[in-house]
Image (cartoon, grey):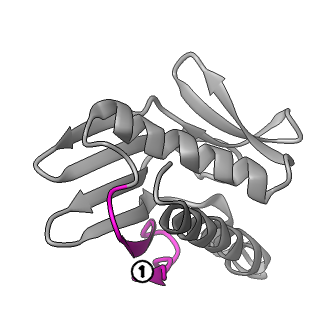
Protein backbone atom coordinates (compact mmCIF):
# COMPACT_ATOMS: atom_id res chain seq x y z
CA UNK A 1 0.00 0.00 0.00
CA UNK A 2 1.43 3.42 -0.90
CA UNK A 3 2.55 5.54 1.98
CA UNK A 4 3.30 9.24 2.13
CA UNK A 5 6.73 10.11 3.39
CA UNK A 6 6.83 13.80 2.70
CA UNK A 7 4.62 16.86 2.89
CA UNK A 8 4.73 20.21 1.19
CA UNK A 9 7.38 22.48 2.61
CA UNK A 10 6.72 25.96 3.92
CA UNK A 11 6.01 28.69 1.39
CA UNK A 12 9.07 30.05 -0.33
CA UNK A 13 11.22 26.99 0.39
CA UNK A 14 10.03 24.78 -2.45
CA UNK A 15 7.65 21.88 -2.22
CA UNK A 16 8.75 18.37 -1.53
CA UNK A 17 6.55 15.31 -1.49
CA UNK A 18 7.15 11.62 -1.91
CA UNK A 19 4.97 8.55 -2.07
CA UNK A 20 6.21 4.99 -2.33
CA UNK A 21 4.98 1.44 -2.35
CA UNK A 22 6.54 -2.00 -2.15
CA UNK A 23 6.06 -4.30 -5.11
CA UNK A 24 6.14 -8.09 -5.54
CA UNK A 25 8.37 -7.71 -8.60
CA UNK A 26 9.64 -4.93 -10.88
CA UNK A 27 6.98 -3.21 -13.01
CA UNK A 28 9.46 -2.07 -15.68
CA UNK A 29 12.71 -3.52 -16.96
CA UNK A 30 16.01 -2.04 -15.78
CA UNK A 31 16.67 -0.03 -18.95
CA UNK A 32 16.29 3.58 -20.03
CA UNK A 33 13.24 2.44 -22.02
CA UNK A 34 11.81 1.08 -18.74
CA UNK A 35 12.53 4.44 -17.10
CA UNK A 36 10.68 6.28 -19.86
CA UNK A 37 7.79 3.83 -19.43
CA UNK A 38 7.48 4.97 -15.80
CA UNK A 39 7.03 8.55 -17.02
CA UNK A 40 4.56 7.65 -19.74
CA UNK A 41 2.48 5.56 -17.32
CA UNK A 42 2.33 8.50 -14.91
CA UNK A 43 1.10 10.91 -17.61
CA UNK A 44 -1.56 8.37 -18.59
CA UNK A 45 -2.69 8.18 -14.96
CA UNK A 46 -2.98 11.98 -14.72
CA UNK A 47 -5.22 12.05 -17.80
CA UNK A 48 -7.31 9.10 -16.59
CA UNK A 49 -7.74 10.50 -13.08
CA UNK A 50 -8.84 13.91 -14.36
CA UNK A 51 -11.13 12.25 -16.93
CA UNK A 52 -9.30 14.06 -19.70
CA UNK A 53 -9.60 17.56 -18.25
CA UNK A 54 -5.84 17.61 -17.69
CA UNK A 55 -3.73 15.93 -20.34
CA UNK A 56 -0.08 15.62 -21.18
CA UNK A 57 0.88 17.39 -24.38
CA UNK A 58 4.21 16.38 -25.90
CA UNK A 59 6.18 19.39 -27.04
CA UNK A 60 9.62 19.63 -28.63
CA UNK A 61 11.38 20.25 -25.34
CA UNK A 62 9.31 18.09 -22.98
CA UNK A 63 5.77 17.63 -21.73
CA UNK A 64 3.14 20.20 -20.78
CA UNK A 65 0.22 19.32 -18.53
CA UNK A 66 -2.66 21.26 -20.04
CA UNK A 67 -6.14 21.99 -18.75
CA UNK A 68 -8.90 21.72 -21.35
CA UNK A 69 -6.27 21.31 -24.10
CA UNK A 70 -5.13 24.94 -23.88
CA UNK A 71 -3.99 26.14 -20.47
CA UNK A 72 -0.49 24.91 -19.49
CA UNK A 73 -0.75 24.13 -15.78
CA UNK A 74 2.79 22.80 -15.55
CA UNK A 75 5.59 22.56 -18.09
CA UNK A 76 8.24 19.88 -17.86
CA UNK A 77 11.52 19.45 -19.69
CA UNK A 78 12.53 16.28 -21.51
CA UNK A 79 12.58 13.05 -19.56
CA UNK A 80 15.98 12.24 -18.07
CA UNK A 81 15.96 8.44 -18.07
CA UNK A 82 18.59 6.42 -16.20
CA UNK A 83 18.92 2.75 -15.31
CA UNK A 84 21.48 0.55 -13.61
CA UNK A 85 22.56 -1.01 -10.32
CA UNK A 86 18.98 -1.80 -9.32
CA UNK A 87 17.64 1.69 -10.02
CA UNK A 88 15.33 2.80 -12.84
CA UNK A 89 14.56 6.52 -12.81
CA UNK A 90 12.67 9.00 -14.96
CA UNK A 91 13.18 12.62 -13.94
CA UNK A 92 11.40 15.61 -15.46
CA UNK A 93 12.72 19.12 -14.76
CA UNK A 94 9.92 21.59 -14.00
CA UNK A 95 10.14 24.48 -16.47
CA UNK A 96 7.11 26.53 -15.43
CA UNK A 97 3.39 26.80 -16.15
CA UNK A 98 0.66 28.77 -14.40
CA UNK A 99 0.91 26.63 -11.23
CA UNK A 100 4.68 27.20 -10.89
CA UNK A 101 6.25 30.43 -9.74
CA UNK A 102 9.07 29.77 -12.21
CA UNK A 103 11.42 27.07 -13.41
CA UNK A 104 12.98 24.79 -10.84
CA UNK A 105 12.44 21.43 -9.24
CA UNK A 106 11.80 17.95 -10.54
CA UNK A 107 9.16 15.27 -10.83
CA UNK A 108 10.93 11.94 -10.23
CA UNK A 109 9.53 8.44 -10.77
CA UNK A 110 11.77 5.59 -9.72
CA UNK A 111 11.92 1.87 -9.13
CA UNK A 112 14.53 0.49 -6.70
CA UNK A 113 15.22 -3.24 -6.88
CA UNK A 114 17.35 -4.74 -4.14
CA UNK A 115 16.12 -7.17 -1.47
CA UNK A 116 12.70 -5.60 -2.02
CA UNK A 117 11.28 -3.69 -4.95
CA UNK A 118 10.02 -0.17 -4.28
CA UNK A 119 8.26 2.21 -6.64
CA UNK A 120 8.28 5.90 -5.74
CA UNK A 121 7.03 9.20 -7.05
CA UNK A 122 8.58 12.40 -5.72
CA UNK A 123 8.49 16.13 -6.32
CA UNK A 124 11.65 17.98 -5.31
CA UNK A 125 12.16 21.74 -5.00
CA UNK A 126 8.93 22.71 -6.77
CA UNK A 127 7.98 26.33 -6.17
CA UNK A 128 4.19 26.46 -6.38
CA UNK A 129 2.67 29.79 -7.34
CA UNK A 130 -0.33 29.09 -5.10
CA UNK A 131 1.88 28.29 -2.09
CA UNK A 132 3.11 31.88 -1.86
CA UNK A 133 1.52 33.68 1.06
CA UNK A 134 -0.79 36.43 -0.07
CA UNK A 135 -2.36 39.24 1.88
CA UNK A 136 -5.39 37.10 2.73
CA UNK A 137 -3.72 33.68 2.38
CA UNK A 138 -6.31 32.61 -0.21
CA UNK A 139 -3.72 31.28 -2.66
CA UNK A 140 -2.04 29.22 0.03
CA UNK A 141 -5.42 27.74 1.02
CA UNK A 142 -6.13 26.86 -2.63
CA UNK A 143 -2.75 25.14 -2.80
CA UNK A 144 -3.30 23.18 0.41
CA UNK A 145 -6.95 22.28 -0.27
CA UNK A 146 -6.88 21.69 -4.02
CA UNK A 147 -3.47 21.27 -5.65
CA UNK A 148 -1.82 19.17 -2.91
CA UNK A 149 -4.74 16.72 -2.44
CA UNK A 150 -5.13 16.26 -6.20
CA UNK A 151 -1.42 15.52 -6.60
CA UNK A 152 -1.53 13.09 -3.67
CA UNK A 153 -4.58 11.25 -5.08
CA UNK A 154 -3.06 10.89 -8.55
CA UNK A 155 0.22 9.71 -7.03
CA UNK A 156 -1.51 7.17 -4.79
CA UNK A 157 -3.62 5.88 -7.68
CA UNK A 158 -0.55 5.55 -9.93
CA UNK A 159 1.30 3.52 -7.29
CA UNK A 160 -1.71 1.36 -6.40
CA UNK A 161 -2.40 0.57 -10.06
CA UNK A 162 1.24 -0.36 -10.74
CA UNK A 163 1.28 -2.63 -7.67
CA UNK A 164 -2.00 -4.32 -8.61
CA UNK A 165 -1.12 -4.83 -12.30
CA UNK A 166 2.44 -5.95 -11.70
CA UNK A 167 3.64 -4.13 -14.82
CA UNK A 168 3.32 -0.80 -16.60
First to last magenta residue range = 1-26
Quadrant housing residue 145: bottom right
Q: Is mark 1 on a helix, strand or loop?
A: loop
Q: Does the magenta stretch include residue 6?
A: yes
The residue tagged 1 is 6
Residue 159 placement, left or right of 142:
left
Instruction: Reply above or below: 122 against 18.
Output: above
Taking the spot 63% from the left edge, 68% from the top edge, the residue there is 157
Instruction: Reply above or below: 163 against 4.
Output: above
Mark 1, residues whose alpha carbon is within 10 Å: few (<14), some, or many (≥20)?
few
Q: Where is residue 122 in the image (x, y as percent from the top left)?
A: 42, 63
Identity of the residue furthest to the left in this view:
85
Identity of the residue furthest to the top in this view:
60
Q: Where is residue 67 in the image (x, y as percent from the top left)?
A: 82, 44
Residue 4 placement, left or right of 70:
left
Residue 16 placement, left or right of 60:
left
Q: Is residue 15 magenta?
A: yes
Residue 144 placement, left or right of 13:
right
Taking the spot 43% from the left edge, 47% from the top edge, the residue there is 104
Q: Using the image as rendered, state which of residue 117 and residue 83 is in the foreground.
A: 117
Amino acid sequence: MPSPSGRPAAAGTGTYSERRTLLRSPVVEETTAGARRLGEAYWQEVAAYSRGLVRPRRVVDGVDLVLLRVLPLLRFGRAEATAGAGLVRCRYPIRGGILASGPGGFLVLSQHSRETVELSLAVHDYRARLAVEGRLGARRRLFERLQVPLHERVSRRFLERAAAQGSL
